[in-house]
Amino acid sequence: MSGIAFKTGGGEGPDLVLIHGFGSDRLSWIGNTPALMQVARVHALDLPGHGDSLDVDCGDASPAALAVQVSRVLAENSIARAHLVGHSLGGGIAMLMAAKHPERVASLTLIAAAGLGTGIDHAFLTRFPGLSEIDETTGLLHRLVVRPQLINRLTVQRVIEQLARPGARDALSRIAAGIIATEVQLSETAQQIALSDVPRLVVFGTEDRINPPDLAAINRIGGTSLLIPSAGHLPHIEAAAQVNRAVATLLSGTAH
C-alpha cells in the first residue's frame, strides 16, 4: 500500500481527483470541493511529504516520482480513470500522469501548473521549508496572493505547525530541489500534452509571482485557458467560484 492520505469527499458522477501544490495539503481545496461535488465524485490526497502523508517515502523527491505514487494510490482505490485537477506542483504531476497513461485521464485542469510558467520562484521553494517565525512566514505567504488578508494568522500558524512535524522540513527541502531540477522536463511534458487528445483547462492568475504565466506555453498546450485578473498563485482560492464553474464546464463537455 502507498500510505498516501486519500479522502473521498463525496458527490456523484465521474471520479475527480484534486492534487495540491508544494507545501500545501488536501485542505487547500475546501473552497472547491462542495461545488465540484455537484458534478463529480470528488477525491483529494496529501502528496508524499505533506499533510498526513508526511511519513510516505518520497523516492528521489522528483515530480515524476510523486506522479508514480499518486497513480498507485488511485489504483489502490479502484479509480481506473479520473479527471485530474492539479495546482502548481500538483499540475505538473497531473501532466506527468497524463503523458504516461493518457487512457487513465479523463481531463486535465492545470492551475498555475509547473511547466506552464515563465519560471518557478526558486527562492520561495528553498525558503519555505525553513520557515519558523510568524513575520517571515507571513511575508513569504503573501507572495502567493494579491489580497494579503487571505493569509490570516491561523493560516500562518498552521504552516509553522506543519513544518515543525518530524521530517517535514527535510522532505519539503528534497521536493523543492526536485522541482527545481526538473523544470525543463515539466516544460517538455507540457509540450507532449499539447499533442494529446486529453481535454484540458489551464488556469492562471495574471498576478502570479511564484510561477508567472507563460502565454506562449499556455497557447501551445491548447484546450481552454482562463486568465484571472487580480489573482496570484492561488486562483482556486482567490477566485474559487470562477474556477469551479470553469472545471464544471470542462467536465460537462467530456466523455466520462
Image (cartoon, rainbow, N blue to C red):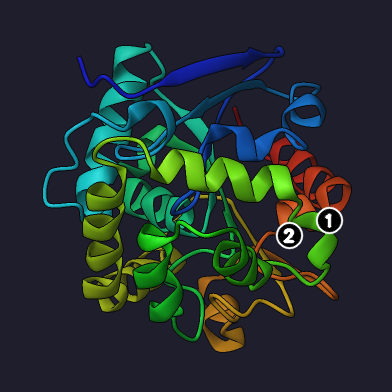
Q: Judge the density around disc 2: few (<14), some (14-19), many (≥20) Cα neighbours within 10 Å.
A: many
- Provide the residue designation for mark 2: 235
Front in this rendered view, residue 45 or 72: 45
Which residue is painted at 82% across and 30% down in the image? Answer: 35
Compared with residue 83, is residue 210 higher up or lower down, i.e. above or below? Answer: below
Compared with residue 13, is residue 104 higher up or lower down, i.e. above or below? Answer: below
Question: Horizontal and vertical percent for residue 21?
Answer: 49, 52
Q: Which mark is residue 176?
A: none
Q: Residue furthest left?
A: 60
- Provide the residue designation for mark 1: 239
State the quadrant of the N terminus: top left
Question: Horizontal and vertical percent for residue 68?
Answer: 23, 39
Question: Horizontal and vertical percent for residue 16?
Answer: 58, 29
Front in this rendered view, residue 38 or 27: 27
The quadrant in which residue 120 appears is: bottom left
Q: Amino acid at mark 2?
A: Pro
Q: Is residue 90 left or right of residue 65?
A: right
Compared with residue 92, is residue 17 higher up or lower down, i.e. above or below? Answer: above
Which residue is painted at 25% across and 26% down in the image? Answer: 72
The quadrant in which residue 74 appears is: top left
